Structure formats: C-alpha cells, structure tokens
Image (cartoon, coloured by chain):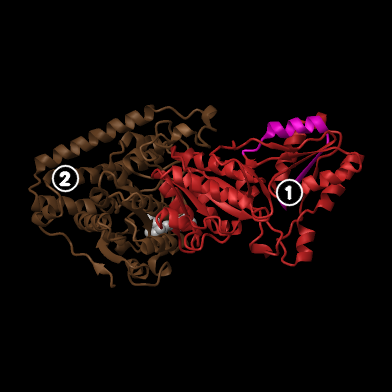
C-alpha cells in the first residue's frame, strides 16, 4: 500500500461536500486567529517575565491542528501536543484558562501542577500530554481499544511529531492498533525539525507516512498549511475508523516557524526555508481562500478580528486575576479517591 | 470457603471481577488461548471472549499505555506482565503517564498490573526480580504484595476497585506451593493494612511476599532458644502500614526488616529510617536488615541460594538481635 499525497482543496462546493458550511468556515477562521493570538500574547507574557519555565508555540501548525479538531466528532477523544493549541481552542477550552495555565495559576487546567501546553480538559474529550514523546500514542490506542470493546462509534486521535516517531512507543502503538484494527487516527505534525534535528537524521523513508504500510493501514501525506485539505483528510480517516475500517496515519507537512521554544532562535534552519514557508502561512492562506471562494468581505473580517481581540483581552485580564496556587494544597491529588472516578469518562 | 492455592485464589478472584463488572478486561501476552504463562487466566477467553481477554503483541508499553487510555475511557483494565521483570519495558509509561495524570490534570488512571515476581527456581537475572521498591518510590503508584491465598484474592479485588494505578506483585514461588482457605464470595482486603502473621514479644520481623514464610520458619526455630518472634506481613508496600509497624516495634523493641529485593535502596531502608525517626526511644537494638545482596539475581541454584535470604540468614539475624 503506497502512501497517498492529498490534493489541495479547491472550490467551496468541494468543501461543502466534505461537510462544512459557511458558518463552519468562519468558525475555523476564528479558531485559527484565537490560536495564534493566544500564542503571540503568551510570547509577550513570557517576555514580561509572567510565564515561569519555558514557552512553546505551534506557529505554522495552526491550520493542521484546527483542521483535525474540526473533523472530530463531539464524543471523539484525542491527545494533542505542544504544537496543537488549535485543538484545544477548537474543542472549546476558554482562552483565559490557557493563559492561567501558562502563568501557573490556580484556574489553569492543571492548577499550577504542570505548565505550558501540558494540559487538557477531559470534559472536552482531551487528554493532557506529558513531556515524554510520543508517550501519548499508546494511550490514544487504549481509548480506541475501550471504544472497540464496548462497540461504541467513537474514534481516538493520537498526535506525534516526526522526530518522536523514532521512539518505540510510536511503533508499539501503531502495531497494536493495526493488529486489532482499532478506531484511531495517528496524526504526525511533521514540521521538518525535531528541536535542531532535521528529518533526514530522524527517519530514512521518503515520507513518514510510508511507515503506515508496515502496520497494515493507509498513510496519507497532507499539506498542513491547507486547513481545508487537512480537514477533508482527517474527516475521511476519522469516519473510516468509526465505520470499522481501522487506523490511518496522516502526515501533516508544515514548517515550525519559530525556534523549538522561546530560548531557541533556530539558527540551524536555513533562512530561505523560513521565507518559503512564510509565503504559505496557513492563516493567510485560508483568509485568501475565504476572500476568493466564500465572499469574505472587509467588514466581516474586521468584525471577526475585533471579536477575537476582545476574547483575548478579556481572557488575559481574567487570567491575571487568577490566584496563585496555595502551597498548602501541594499534596492534593497525588492519589485519586473513589469520588474522582465520577467524571464524564469514568462514568 | 475452600482450600485453594495462591494461584487459584488470584484466578478465581479475577474471574469473579470479570463476571460482575463489564468494565474489567484482561490484556497481556499469551493470556488468551494459552491462559497466561502461569495459567492464571486459563479458560478465561472461552468464558469472556477475545475482546475481554486480549492477547496482545509482545509490547509492554502498548499494553500499559492502552490500559491507561482505556481506563480514562471508563474501563477497568487488568494487565498481565508475563514476568515482573519485563515491566522495565513499560516503566516509562507507568511512571511518566499513569502515575502523574491524577496529580497534573485530575484524571484518575484505575489500572491494575499483575506482576509474577520473585526467584527461587533458577529463573536467572531476568525472570526472578522483585522490583517493588523502584515503584514504591514513585508518587502516584500503589504496590501490593500479597503473601496468602486469602489476601491475594482480597487485594486483587481492592486493586481493581482502586482509582489509582496498582502494581500487583504475585510471587511465583507461592503460586502452587501455598494453600489456604479462601472465601467463595467477593471481599475486599484493604490496601495499606498490615497483617500479623505470627504474634511474638521479643523480636519483630517486618516483611512481605514469599519472605513471610521464611520469617515464619525462622521464628519457629527461635522457639527453641526461648525467643518469641512476631512476624508482620506488610501486605502492601505502598501505601505501607506505618502504624502497625511502629506498634509492633514498640511492643518488641527489636526489629529485623526482611525482603527478597536487593539491599541498597530496597524498601527495607525506608522502613528502617522511619523506625529510627519515630520509634528510636523504643528500640533496644539497632534495626537489622536481611535482604538480597547488591547483585543481579544469579542463575545457578547454588548462587541463587546464596542470593535469596534463607531461613538460616534470618535465624542468624534474629539470634544476634535477641542477644544484643
Ligand atoms: C522522550 C523524549 N526525549 C526528549 C525530549 C525533549 N524534546 C522535546 S520536543 C523535542 C523535539 C521533538 O520533535 P518532534 O517530535 O518532531 O516534535 P516538534 O517539537 O517538532 O513538534 C525533544 C527532543 C522529549 N520531550 N521526550
Ligand atoms: Mg518536528
């Protein structure tokens, strides 16, 4: 089974066929802007010394993240990573809680127990990542296993970076999923770099998605800057999994448009590469598409921009008001109590 | 009530849980058609089907990671490591994901990992280990080490009910050697409560797992010396019953900590330190440890006998304490 390279998305009609109406398209646009806005403001907060530790962004990956998340059903679950802020935003995490998380405050999803994008809202079907990559892939497979055992029509989405694909967890997860044909979609954020390591030092096949064949399922390479193509391919893979068709490996190609984290100026990435991919900025690209295909007009665009700005401003204010966690609560929650099992998932 | 082996007690307890709770499933290498390397799940696949008794690929990270994911989706997975030793391949998942998820994001991970552990039959360095102290060191994990058939069943039920990741160390040397009365009905043996295996007044031995029987043999030998030995079976190493240990120390004033795992960094050190901190005034002799020496578990029967604490070693330690 050879890897398939997905076509770009053309007309509005094609998009409609894939299941999106104009409101959906504008929602995608909003999510893209909020995602980038959160990370840009996070960067400022960091420079102001308000974010302890390190700070990561997914600049360049917004379309990939929002595209996949838009394709997920309400009861589907996923394990997004450090480039996938767009997933949290699309699933409906309130931005102020993300800022609170960045700043280690009590109202962040981890109440200061963990930082940066190491967070998720279980009520929205998301499972919080750990640092170790790609440790969440076997967990995503386990979610899919639960769905399969209970014969539920739900799908799990597991994210990983092309660099972390070198670790055994990726292999074990995909192999188990392939053997059991579990309802899981593997999404590789291939941003061409793993910290300073280029892809040719990370894997030896042409496309990372070539590996899917080794696990007995389909691999698809998608331009990760084309949010609609990502959506269409993710939707197809998710619905296939839902229908019992087993896993798919989606490789979403982008470029990490900043350093690995704030401390890294990415001196090792050729300047021309940045210039080339800057011309393919996912948000700008989608904005142009909306102008050309969905009659986005200046006025409407301004309205959206103003709304996003207000969301972000309000969120920042609210997050800065969030209290610091109380050190007296440090030992809370090391062990779960039976009451903790009273969650939407453990029901 | 019926007399059962330790292995049968685990098997029956697990079957009962599978029968009463749809959320419980078993996953591991060769657990299905073959019934597991030690036959704990023999016949289970016929009864519960291939999606509840799941033969996995040879992939410990996938097994444990999948358990956590399924647990987060409301299942109650019971994983079998073919031998406790292979948990090293799943260490990262347990320690990095399963142990920390509740603390970080409030998500409980109720999984049970069954670990056939311990030596005594020339299993060599990779089929004989007792890695409980490594995991007892990890906040968020619980470690259970039953010594009797009754406890094995009751603690397995408790482990499945528990909202945390629980490592269930079942000692291979006890599987078919130890028999005892086991209630037929379901019951829960609480995690964190020690058991007095034998009452005594002069010296107390704190131990768990197969060493409970070694301690008991040694205690019988000390009767001839007119020394009365108490044996405390910790039952669970994390959490451990500090109150019961300190009470026994206060009563006997002399204490020997015994375990099959190696000495340095073994859990006995934690127990000894706690006694030193909290019961120093009650001691009439320094705390003594009898443990395996700091080397891998050897293969040769002669060497293995020198490695695993023997009744003679415990007798010697007890006599020294009695004479102190
Ligand atoms: C097991 C492990 N080793 C090392 C690291 C440190 N680290 C964090 S991100 C990263 C690069 C990851 O590259 P990739 O998987 O391509 O994801 P990207 O950051 O490019 O999105 C490294 C080496 C880690 N998080 N986990
Ligand atoms: Mg990368």
**Residue at point 24% right, 52% down?**
A67
| Residue nearest the viewer, comparing B88 with B145 | B145
Which label was assigned to residue B211? 1
Q: What is the x, y in percent for residue A113?
A: 48, 37
**Callout 1: SS:** helix
Q: Chain of mark 1?
A: B
**Residue at point 78% right, 60% down?**
B305
| Residue nearest the viewer, comparing B107 with B167 | B167
Which label was assigned to residue A24? 2
A276 sits to left or right of B65: left
**Callout 2: SS:** helix
Say which chain is brown. A
Q: Is residue A74 magenta?
A: no
Q: What is the x, y in percent for residue A196?
A: 43, 61
Q: Nearer the viewer, mark 2 or mark 1?
A: 1
The residue at label 2 has a CB less than 8 Å from ligand 1: no
| Residue nearest the viewer, comparing B179 with A86 | B179
Q: What is the x, y in percent for residue B238?
A: 62, 41
Count every numbered label the image shows and give the total: 2
Q: Is residue B201 visible?
A: yes
- Residue stretch in magenta: B239-261
Q: Is residue A264 visible?
A: no
**Residue at point 59% right, 37% down?**
B189
Chain B: its colour in the image is: red
Q: Are marks 2 and 1 on the same chain?
A: no
Dividing the picture into quadrants, the one containing residue A110 is: top left
């Amino acid at each position: 089974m050879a890897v398939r390279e997905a076509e770009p998305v053309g007309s509005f009609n094609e998009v409609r066929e894939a299941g999106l109406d104009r409101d959906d398209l504008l929602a995608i646009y909003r999510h893209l802007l909020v995602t980038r806005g959160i990370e840009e403001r996070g960067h400022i907060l960091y420079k102001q010394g308000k974010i302890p530790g390190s700070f990561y962004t997914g600049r360049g990956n917004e379309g990939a993240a929002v595209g996949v998340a838009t394709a997920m059903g309400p009861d589907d679950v996923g394990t997004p990573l450090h480039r996938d802020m767009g997933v949290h935003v699309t699933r409906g995490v309130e931005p102020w809680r993300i800022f609170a998380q960045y700043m280690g405050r009590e109202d962040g999803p981890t109440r200061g127990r963990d930082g940066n994008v190491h967070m998720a809202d279980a009520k929205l079907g998301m499972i919080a990542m750990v640092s170790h990559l790609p440790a969440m892939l076997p967990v995503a497979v386990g979610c899919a296993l639960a769905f399969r055992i209970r014969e539920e029509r739900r799908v799990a989405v597991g994210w990983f970076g092309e660099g972390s694909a070198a670790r055994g967890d990726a292999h074990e997860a995909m192999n188990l999923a392939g053997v059991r044909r579990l309802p899981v979609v593997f999404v590789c954020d291939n941003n061409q770099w793993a910290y300073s390591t280029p892809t040719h030092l990370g894997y030896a096949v042409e496309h990372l998605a070539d590996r899917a064949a080794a696990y007995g399922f389909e691999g698809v390479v998608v331009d990760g800057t084309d949010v609609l193509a990502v959506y269409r391919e993710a939707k197809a893979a998710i619905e296939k999994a839902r229908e019992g068709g087993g896993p798919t490996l989606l490789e979403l190609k982008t470029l990490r448009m900043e350093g690995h984290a704030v401390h890294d100026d990415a001196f090792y990435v050729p300047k021309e590469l940045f210039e080339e991919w800057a011309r393919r900025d996912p948000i700008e690209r989608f904005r142009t598409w909306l102008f050309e295909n969905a009659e986005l007009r200046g006025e409407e665009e301004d309205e959206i921009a103003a709304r996003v700005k207000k969301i972000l401003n309000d969120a920042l204010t609210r997050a800065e008001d969030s209290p610091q966690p109380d050190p007296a609560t440090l030992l809370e929650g090391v062990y779960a109590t039976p009451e903790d099992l009273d969650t939407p998932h453990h029901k | 009530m019926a007399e059962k082996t330790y292995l049968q007690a685990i098997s029956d307890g697990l079957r009962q849980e599978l029968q009463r709770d749809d959320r419980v499933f078993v996953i591991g290498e060769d657990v299905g058609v073959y019934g597991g390397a030690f036959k704990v799940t023999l016949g289970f696949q016929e009864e519960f089907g291939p999606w509840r008794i799941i033969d996995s690929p040879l992939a410990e990270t996938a097994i444990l990671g999948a358990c956590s994911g399924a647990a987060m989706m409301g299942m109650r997975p019971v994983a079998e490591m073919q031998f406790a030793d292979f948990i090293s391949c799943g260490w990262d998942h347990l320690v990095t994901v399963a142990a920390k998820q509740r603390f970080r994001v409030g998500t409980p991970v109720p999984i049970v990992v069954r670990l056939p552990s311990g030596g005594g039959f020339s299993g060599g360095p990779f089929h004989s280990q007792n890695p409980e102290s490594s995991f007892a060191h990890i906040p968020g994990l619980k470690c259970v080490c039953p010594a009797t058939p009754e406890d094995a069943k009751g603690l397995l039920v408790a482990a499945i009910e528990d909202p945390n990741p629980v490592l269930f160390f079942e000692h291979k040397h006890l599987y078919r050697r130890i028999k005892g009365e086991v209630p037929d009905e379901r019951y829960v043996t609480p995690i964190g409560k020690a058991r007095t295996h034998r009452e005594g007044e002069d010296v107390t031995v704190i131990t768990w797992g197969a060493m409970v029987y070694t301690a008991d043999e040694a205690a019988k030998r000390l009767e001839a010396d007119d020394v009365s030995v108490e044996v405390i079976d910790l039952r669970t190493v994390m959490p451990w019953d500090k109150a019961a240990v300190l009470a026994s120390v206060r009563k006997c004033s002399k204490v020997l900590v015994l375990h099959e795992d190696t000495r340095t960094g073994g859990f006995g050190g934690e127990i000894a330190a706690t006694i030193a901190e909290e019961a120093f005034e009650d001691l009439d002799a320094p705390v003594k440890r009898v443990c395996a020496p700091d080397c891998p578990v050897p293969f040769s029967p002669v060497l293995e006998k020198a490695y695993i604490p023997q009744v003679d070693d415990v007798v010697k330690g007890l006599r020294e304490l009695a004479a102190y």
